[in-house]
């Protein structure tokens, strides 16, 4: 192969394998969000013509139109909509990776269920920052997202479960203790003392569709056949407890997560029986020594805060 021909082949191979410039991806993300070249230019402090050129460059790379141009706005094409989540995910990952490097490892991202974050972690953040002032915590409540624990991803995961996650380092944070809870005014409708059969006339509030928490507690009371007049399902225990505090019905609440509401009297426990479900909230990270060392300050604090 001659010299010029070889150079042409190498050039074509480079063009096929190269990635689009990062600036064009950021511009695409902002245009997609604003629906306007003009607004994107203002947000990125660029000229409108520069925005247009970068979008054209990206369209040339993908070989298709990413936007439909109208007089005062632009609208994503089908191809444009398909790459929006890819581009945004890439930009978020890069931003998190750069931030982790910039702060020299003192910035951690922790993913946890919303109820645990609001009812257990948030009231204790002041203590955490007081003990570890140089530690910056990003709280991520997308508990349904599958973690990789890689660079730019989360560092520690808090999950509800039975503690069995093979290959991971696992620490128990909160063992689940369950009992019915309701507002003080609602409790009067259950009798004095409260009667199990009164629950049949109530709205029972659930934070899981299987209603397994209520089943466990009712079985412990020997009420195998109790059926409530209505069942209301929420996607978090926090919502269920908030609804109970408003007087809507009776929820099966965790004694640890409801601590503040119980102490303030917003919620009461009309029945004496408290059961341990065998489940709870656990902190999880890879079992590698470097992964455990990275979260050691936070993990040690979480374990120290575990109720005795």
Image (cartoon, grey):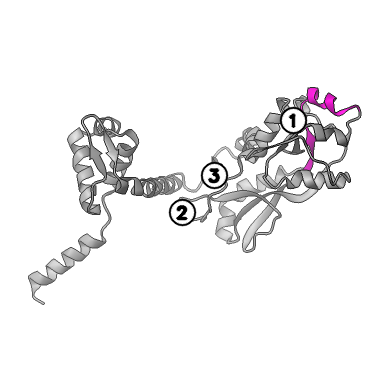
Which residue, given by chain and number where applicable, does mark 3 sit on?
142
The span from disc 3 to disc 2 (Cα, nearest Å) is 18 Å
The residue drawn where x is 48% and y is 56% is 150
In this view, the residue in front, 268 or 116, is 268
Earlier-in-chain disc, 1 versus 2: 2
Mark 1 element type:
loop
Earlier-in-chain disc, 3 versus 1: 3
Q: x%, y% of residue 171?
A: 68, 53
Is residue 119 visible in this depiction of the protein? no
The residue drawn where x is 22% and y is 53% is 63
The span from disc 3 to disc 1 (Cα, nearest Å) is 28 Å
Q: x%, y% of residue 48?
A: 20, 33
**Which residue appears farthest toward the bottom when viewing the image?**
1
How many residues crowd mark 1 within 10 Å: few (<14), some (14–19), many (20+)? many
In this view, the residue in front, 176 or 77, is 77
**Which residue appears farthest toward the right when viewing the image?**
193
The span from disc 1 to disc 2 (Cα, nearest Å) is 45 Å
On screen, residue 45 above or below 163: above
In this view, the residue in front, 298 or 145, is 145
Q: Which residues are magenta?
A: 176-192
Residue 222 falls within the magenta-colored stretch: no
The answer to whether the residues at label 1 and label 2 have Cβ atoms under 8 Å apart is no
Q: Kindly indicate the quadrant of the structure image that contains residue 126.
A: top right
The residue drawn where x is 25% and y is 53% is 62
Question: Left of 258 or right of it: where is 135?
Answer: left
Q: x%, y% of residue 115?
A: 64, 38
Which residue, given by chain and number where applicable, does mark 2 sit on?
151
Res. 249 mark: 1
Earlier-in-chain disc, 3 versus 2: 3
In this view, the residue in front, 169 or 204, is 204
Mark 2 element type:
loop
Question: Left of 7 or right of it: where is 234?
Answer: right
């Amino acid at each position: 192969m001659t010299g010029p021909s070889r150079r042409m082949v190498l050039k074509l191979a480079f063009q096929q394998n190269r990635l689009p410039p990062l600036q064009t991806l950021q511009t695409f993300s902002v245009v997609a969000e604003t629906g306007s070249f003009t607004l994107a230019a203002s947000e990125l402090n660029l000229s409108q013509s520069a925005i247009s050129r970068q979008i054209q460059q990206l369209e040339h790379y993908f070989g298709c139109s990413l936007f439909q141009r109208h007089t005062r706005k632009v609208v994503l094409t089908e191809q444009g909509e398909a790459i929006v989540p890819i581009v945004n995910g890439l930009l978020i990952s890069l931003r998190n990776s750069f931030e982790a490097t910039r702060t020299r490892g003192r910035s951690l991202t922790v993913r946890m269920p919303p109820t645990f974050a609001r009812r257990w972690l948030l009231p204790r953040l002041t203590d955490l920052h007081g003990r570890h002032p140089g530690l910056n915590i990003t709280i991520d409540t997308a508990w349904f997202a599958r973690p990789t624990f890689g660079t730019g991803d989360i560092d520690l995961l808090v999950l509800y479960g039975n503690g069995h996650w093979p290959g991971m380092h696992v620490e128990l944070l909160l063992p689940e203790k369950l009992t019915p809870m309701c507002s003080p005014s609602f409790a009067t409708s259950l009798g004095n003392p409260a009667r199990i059969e009164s629950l049949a006339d109530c709205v029972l509030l659930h934070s899981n569709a299987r209603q397994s928490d209520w089943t466990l507690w009712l079985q412990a009371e020997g009420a195998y056949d109790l059926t409530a007049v209505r069942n209301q399902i929420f996607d978090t225990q926090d919502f269920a407890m908030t609804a109970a505090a408003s007087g809507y019905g009776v929820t099966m609440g965790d004694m640890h997560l409801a601590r503040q509401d119980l102490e303030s009297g917003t919620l009461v426990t009309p029945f004496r029986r408290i059961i341990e479900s065998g489940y709870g909230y656990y902190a999880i990270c890879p079992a590698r020594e470097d992964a455990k060392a990275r979260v050691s300050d936070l993990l040690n604090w979480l374990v120290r805060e575990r109720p005795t």
